[in-house]
């Protein structure tokens, strides 16, 4: 395929996809569940105000937000989904009150016909949209107001210090006095009520709730609609058609992708390292250290699943609660993966142009120390926020924002955003001389490299698009711009270009083939990837059209991943092409692992949960971390390690590595990740799915179900994979630091 055609396709995909993404973003603003000025009873009693709901959202964020259970299915998996839990408790309370008033018995004690009658009345009341556009108020019955008081009392006891709820708190890994102030607790209860009201209230003129009838709860009529089934079927058809077309393309173009024979000696063996290239070494030391800390936080977080408030008897949750350990576990993963990729870019840029800009080393060093400040400052602020040591405004700026993957306070977000533009400036000035050379065979690849770098710096800015009290549906829209488009999207484009440059620089791939391959892969990936963002937003208060687009385009995301075997086979062949290439064996093997996990983690496990009907029952269950772990670490983490090892190899080409520790690390990380998923996380998720279909999401996430003996056993089994995985990480660190000390090198 011609380069001009590919560039045209790339521009069209970007313009059309972001046009649609922006249009439906506006629709989300317009059609999000309303936040009323007040909620009143039919007797005129004011139950809560808009200010209380918004402040309650901030209280929820301050204690960890999506790191303590979930709201609308997004967040952590230890505690309940608070909207599903509140909805079920509200329904049961009202049914019991109605049964006592009507029949003098509890709901469970009356006949099946009587229960059906009361359920019909309950649905009529709870699903009715009583929001008045004129007065900006929601009207509820006195009975529902009584339910609000009862559930508020339950939650107050749970999040504060009711001794009768110690066992439940332990099951949920929520320390006593997570909310220390009764006024704050009442605010959070107001937010929980509103978020739950959105899940059961029908949109004006429609028979579907603001969250598309999610969560599943038969008592209130929350069941999957025909739309979910139709678009699920359509997504499967699109997937099959896409795989067929992609297979045809690979078959017809296979001969065109043959490369010239690799050179007999390493083409870069005589290349000198510039001062700024050498200065990137400390980035990789920090990457390695962060990997160890991140995995330690993962071990602690996983253990809280079986000992909610302790760590092998130690009362660790008093100083490091689950919400903090999980926050740090996720945040550190993003920090070290991004740092590895950014450092690779800083190393490659002068090598590409062959020129070292003035003060480039200084810029690399300044950026390094800025990143250290961001890491330490943001983690400390998150701890202070969760420990309730900050006011709501201070927490937003310096503490814990409560949104998974973008938990860091707004000040740290802005600091990081500025740091990314410093990185972009350093990248641009270093590769600019090569970009000006119109005769260069790498020019198109360089342009793509620069575009990807600009996107990395720019798209993190989506995380600044919400404010302290922005509507949750709108904040979720922008949050997924960061998580899906920044982390999963343009970072992957950047990595694809970076790997191509590594191989072109070593003359293992011709520049022309690398250019067309990168452009084609980018077009295919972004064709599904940009609009595939919507599959995260099926049930977050968005219009039905978002569901249709998300289902269709998220299926296209999987298409290029099912053929990752071609990439793995190609990389293996490269590693065996010449004796000198064998020095790059382990970096390339990590790229092979990326292809494997792209297929399994991002492809199979991603499509497991992406279709609407599947996600309807699976959202917020352990099937999501199956995809999360195998895609985030399996793909992006392995890629970050591979890039790091490639750079470390190029920094000292003449040395001979002692490979036993890196070999152990490679196999332990991959085997450990596999066992973690197959022995524990996936079986737990599948059993939860069965429970969700049969009883509802509230039960699948309940302490009653998750603390049952079979589920306890499955969670303990995770220790096998986790231990092997952790040993691999220690071996990796031992190897990386040993390159400096000498124990990872063979003596000549």
Image: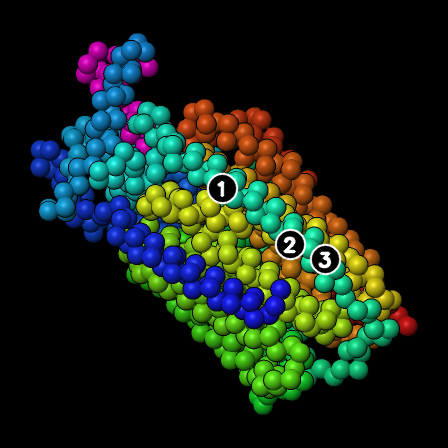
Is 433 magenta? The answer is no
Magenta span: chief secondary structure: helix
How far is disc 1 from disc 3 in space, using C-alphas? 28 Å
- The answer to whether residue 387 shows anywhere in this view is no
1 or 3: mark nearer the eye: 3
- The answer to whether residue 124 shows anywhere in this view is yes
Chain-order first, disc 1 or disc 3 = 1
Q: Quadrant of the N terminus?
A: bottom right
From what the image shows, is residue 560 above or below residue 45? Answer: below
Is 105 magenta? The answer is yes
Residue nearest the observer in this picture, 394 or 41: 41
Q: Which element carries disc 3, helix, strand or loop? A: loop
Residue most extreme to the right: 748
Label 3 neighbour load within 10 Å: few <14, some 14-19, many 20+: few
Q: Which residues are magenta?
A: 85-109
Chain-order first, disc 2 or disc 1 = 1
Residue of label 2: 249
Residue of label 3: 254
| 690 relative to 250 in the view: left or right | left
Q: Which element carries disc 1, helix, strand or loop? A: helix
Q: Which element carries disc 2, helix, strand or loop? A: helix
Residue nearest the observer in this picture, 475 or 384: 475
Give coordinates of residue 362: x percent, y percent.
57, 84
From what the image shows, is residue 336 above or below residue 297? Answer: below
Residue 235, label in figure: 1
């Amino acid at each position: 395929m011609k380069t001009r055609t590919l560039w045209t396709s790339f521009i069209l995909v970007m313009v059309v996809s972001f046009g649609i993404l922006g249009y439906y973003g506006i629709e989300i603003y317009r059609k999000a569940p309303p936040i009323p000025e007040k909620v009143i009873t039919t007797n005129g009693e004011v139950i809560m105000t808009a200010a209380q709901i918004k402040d309650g959202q901030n209280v929820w964020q301050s204690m960890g937000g999506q790191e303590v259970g979930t709201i609308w299915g997004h967040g952590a998996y230890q505690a309940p989904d608070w909207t599903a839990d509140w909805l079920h408790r509200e329904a049961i309370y009202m049914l019991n009150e109605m049964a006592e008033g009507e029949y003098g018995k509890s709901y469970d004690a009356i006949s099946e016909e009587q229960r059906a009658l009361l359920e019909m009345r309950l649905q009529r009341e709870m699903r009715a949209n009583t929001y008045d556009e004129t007065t900006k108020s929601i009207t509820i019955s006195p009975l529902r107001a009584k339910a609000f008081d009862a559930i508020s009392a339950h939650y107050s006891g749970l999040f504060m210090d009711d001794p009768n709820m110690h066992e439940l708190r332990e099951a949920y890994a929520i320390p006593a006095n997570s909310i220390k102030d009764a006024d704050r607790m009442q605010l959070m209860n107001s937010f929980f009520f509103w978020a739950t009201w959105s899940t059961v209230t029908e949109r004006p003129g429609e028979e579907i709730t603001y969250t598309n009838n999610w969560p599943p709860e038969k008592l209130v009529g929350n069941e999957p609609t025909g739309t979910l089934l139709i678009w699920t079927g359509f997504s499967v058809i699109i997937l099959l058609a896409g795989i067929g077309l992609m297979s045809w393309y690979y078959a017809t173009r296979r001969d065109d992708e043959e490369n010239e024979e690799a050179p007999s000696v390493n083409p870069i063996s005589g290349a000198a390292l510039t001062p700024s290239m050498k200065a990137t070494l400390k980035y990789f030391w920090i990457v390695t250290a962060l990997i160890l800390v991140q995995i330690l936080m993962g071990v602690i977080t996983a253990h809280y699943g079986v000992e909610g408030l302790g760590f092998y008897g130690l009362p660790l949750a008093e100083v490091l609660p689950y919400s903090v350990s999980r926050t740090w576990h996720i945040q550190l993963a993003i920090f070290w993966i991004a740092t590895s990729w950014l450092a690779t870019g800083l190393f490659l840029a002068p090598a590409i142009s062959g020129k070292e800009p003035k003060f480039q080393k200084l810029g690399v060093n300044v950026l390094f120390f800025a990143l250290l400040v961001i890491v330490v400052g943001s983690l400390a602020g998150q701890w202070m926020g969760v420990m309730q040591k900050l006011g709501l405004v201070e927490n937003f700026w310096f503490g814990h924002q409560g949104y998974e993957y973008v938990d860091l306070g707004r000040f740290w977000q802005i600091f990081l955003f500025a740091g990314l533009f410093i990185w972009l400036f350093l990248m641009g000035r270093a590769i600019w001389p090569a970009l000006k050379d119109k005769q260069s065979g790498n020019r198109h690849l360089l342009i793509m490299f620069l575009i990807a770098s600009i996107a990395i710096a720019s798209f993190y800015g989506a995380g600044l698009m919400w404010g302290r009290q922005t509507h949750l549906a709108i904040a979720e829209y922008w949050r997924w711009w960061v998580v899906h488009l920044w982390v999963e999207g343009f970072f992957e484009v950047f990595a694809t270009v970076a790997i191509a440059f590594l191989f072109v620089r070593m003359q293992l791939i011709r520049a022309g083939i690398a250019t067309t391959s990168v452009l084609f892969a980018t077009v295919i990936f972004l064709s599904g990837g940009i609009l595939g963002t919507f599959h995260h937003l099926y049930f977050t208060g968005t219009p039905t059209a978002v569901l249709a687009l998300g289902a269709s385009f998220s299926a296209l995301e999987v298409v290029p991943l099912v053929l990752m075997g071609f990439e793995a086979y190609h990389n293996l062949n490269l590693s065996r092409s010449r004796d000198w290439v064998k020095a790059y064996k382990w970096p390339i093997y990590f790229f092979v692992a990326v292809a494997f996990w792209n297929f399994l983690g991002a492809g199979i496990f991603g499509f497991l949960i992406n279709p609407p009907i599947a996600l309807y029952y699976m959202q917020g269950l352990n099937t999501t971390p199956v995809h999360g772990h195998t895609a985030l670490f399996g793909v992006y983490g392995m890629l970050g390690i591979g890039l790091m090892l490639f750079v470390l190899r190029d920094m000292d080409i003449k040395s001979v590595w002692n490979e036993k520790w890196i070999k152990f690390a490679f196999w332990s990380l991959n085997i450990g990740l596999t066992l973690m998923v197959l022995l524990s996380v996936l079986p737990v998720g599948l059993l939860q799915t069965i429970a969700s279909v049969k009883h509802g999401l509230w039960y699948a996430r309940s302490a009653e179900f998750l603390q049952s003996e079979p589920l306890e056993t499955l969670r303990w089994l995770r220790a096998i994979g986790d231990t092997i995985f952790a040993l691999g990480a220690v071996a990796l660190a031992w190897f990386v630091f040993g390159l400096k000390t000498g124990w990872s090198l063979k003596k000549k």
